[in-house]
Image (cartoon, helix red, strand yellow):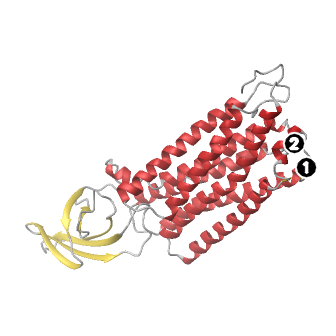
Amino acid sequence: MKNSAGAGKPSRGHELLLVQLVFVSLAGIATLIRAYVKVFLVGRVTSDDYLIFAAMGGYAAYAAVAIDGVVNGATGQDVSQLYTPSQAAKSLLGWYLCEAMYAPITLAIRASVCIVLLRITTKKAYRVIIWINVGVIAVVSIVFAFVMAFQCSPPSYFWKQVFGEEGSCIDKRIVMISVYVHSVFSAVSDWCLGLLPIAILWGVQINMRTKVIVAVLLSLGMIAGVVLIVRMPYVTTLQPSLEFLYVSVDVAIWSVMEPALGIIAACVATYRPLFKTWGFGWGSTRRSAATVSHGYGRSQRRTGHWELHSQTDLNRPPMPGDRNAYTESVISGEAPSPETKIAKTTELIDTSDPAVAQSDSRKIFHERDWS
């Protein structure tokens, strides 16, 4: 944006610059919070975290290239404006790099989500769906990245053509079709991965409030799928040319939003331990301390009142951020009488929460409403 606009169309580079700065900042903050939760609260960083961290690193590089194209290049400027061939080449190089990085970044995000879903479900049908999802989107992403990287021969012709260098590019319709195919498969993948948590958690024995919250957090990635659908009408041409720098701004804006939304959604789903340290519980119960042992025990809370506890390991989908969990069945009531009514409740105890787990893993906090 070094040169002032001429009598032609006004520059749109500032629109892309603003959107990119906002979304890379939000994605970066979300990733830092996730890192804090996993390192300091949960105490364990897993493969899905590393994929998100890698995706964020790639997206930061993506953003830097896009911003450089606006600030020092000619991104968003019309051919009637006064910019130099060097500025045009810088922006075209930025576009080339962003197109090449886009598919690997979004693939890493979706792979991270798939790992989380595989971790929380043991049902074969759901696992098959997840594996098919990640397999198909991996193939589509690799093919798309290959087309974007080698759409011109030599590849440098993409940005050096403004200097009159020799070379050629494939038919622009192939590029457009590749973008459409990748967008459709990516949107379907996002919606599939967004709806699966609802199905997975439907039969899990946790209270409805927790079930809804966790399902919503895990389904936020569907927003990225919506962005992909909205972007599709703007994919009119991606053929490298001087006019390309102006007409492609809408595609660029939607393209920088989608990876950021995916990263944010994947990160927010891991914030449960942080929310609990802030006092935002996932249930509607009160908290009281107790110590339980494996097997069965009997405790006397007050005269005439008894409880029978049983504890078993739970083969159930862990919540995001969990390290271990189990069920506890409690049968309670007053001393035997004709009016005695016995109530049984089954609870999930999350021992990965530092506010819950003590040094001895058997010393926990019960969450129970006795009213």
Residue 167 disc label:
1
In this rendering, position of residue 47 left or right of residue 160? left
Q: Quadrant of the C terminus?
A: bottom left
Residue highlighted by disc 2: 161
| Front one among 20 and 269 | 20
**CB of mark 1 within 8 Å of CB of mark 2?**
yes
* Residue 160 locus on image (x, y percent): 84, 42
| Front one among 304 and 198 | 198
In this rendering, position of residue 51 left or right of residue 170? left
Q: Residue at x 19, y 65 (%)?
A: 290
In this rendering, position of residue 101 left or right of residue 339? right
Residue type at numbered disc 1? Gly
Could you classify mark 2 by the number of other residues whose Cα lies within 10 Å: few (under 14), some (14-19), or many (20 or more)?
A: some
Looking at the image, is mark 1 or mark 2 earlier in the sequence?
2
* Residue 362 locus on image (x, y percent): 24, 70
Q: Residue at x 50, y 71 (%)?
A: 121
Could you classify mark 1 by the number of other residues whose Cα lies within 10 Å: few (under 14), some (14-19), or many (20 or more)?
A: some
Is 40 above or below relative to 161?
below
Residue type at numbered disc 2? Gln
Distance between the alpha carbons at the discs numbered 1 and 2: 8 Å
Is 286 above or below relative to 162?
below
The answer to whether one can see residue 341 in this image is no
Q: How many marks?
A: 2
* Residue 139 locus on image (x, y percent): 72, 66
Residue that extends furthest to the bottom in the rendered view of this protein: 295
**Kind of element beneath mark 1:** loop
Res. 347 image quadrant: bottom left
**Kind of element beneath mark 2:** helix
Q: Residue at x 75, y 38 (%)?
A: 91
